[in-house]
Image (cartoon, helix red, strand yellow):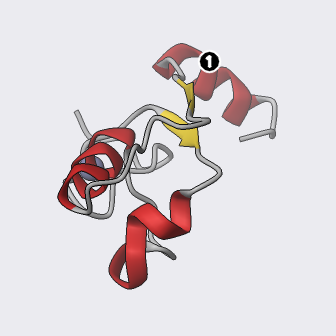
Amino acid sequence: MSDPTRQGCARCHRRGWGFWSPIFHTVAGHTWRDADICVFCFGELGDEKWIVWTEGLKIMPMSMKEQREGVERGNP
Ligand SMILES: [Zn+2]
């Protein structure tokens, strides 16, 4: 199902879970540091670079319902 308000991952185009990491730039590297990537790709990149990418990782899943309601409130 296509939903233009829901951001897909720049690397694998999967949609969904936001996350935050204190070492994002290190793990993402030059190629992906400014891109919007998903937590799954983040983990793959971290493994490729042999980094403990779970360090300080916060995962913020968002349901379609929450996001839709956020958009309707004008608060995406
Ligand atoms: Zn991805």
Q: Nearer the viewer, residue 65 or 8?
A: 8
Mark 1 is on which residue type?
A: Glu
Q: For the point 50% across and 17% down, which residue is it? A: 63
Q: For the point 45% across and 50% down, which residue is it? A: 7
Q: For the point 62% across and 18% down, which residue is it? A: 66
Q: For the point 32% across and 63% down, which residue is it? A: 10
Location of the N terminus (image quadrant): top left
Q: Tell me which corner region of the image, top left, top right, bottom left or bottom right, holds residue 49.
A: bottom left
Farthest bottom residue in view:
30
Q: Does 13 sit above or below residue 59?
A: below
Q: Tell me which corner region of the image, top left, top right, bottom left or bottom right, holds residue 40.
A: top left
Q: Does 46 sit above or below residue 28?
A: above
Q: Nearer the viewer, residue 36 or 39?
A: 39
Measured from the top left, where is residue 36 in percent x and y? 46, 61
Instruction: State left or right for residue 9 relative to residue 60.
Output: left
Measured from the top left, where is residue 65 in percent x and y? 54, 15
Measured from the top left, where is residue 12 in percent x and y? 19, 54
Instruction: State left or right for residue 13 relative to residue 76.
Output: left
Q: Does 15 sit above or below residue 36?
A: above
Q: Residues within 10 Å of mark 1 (few under 14, many from 20)?
A: few
Q: Classify mark 1: helix, strand or loop.
A: helix
Q: Nearer the viewer, residue 72 or 31?
A: 31
Instruction: State left or right for residue 1 relative to residue 3.
Output: left
Is the residue marked 1 within 8 Å of ligand 1, measured from its CB? no
- The residue wearing badge 1 is 66
Location of the C terminus (image quadrant): top right
Instruction: State left or right for residue 66 relative to residue 26.
Output: right
Tell me how many marks there are: 1
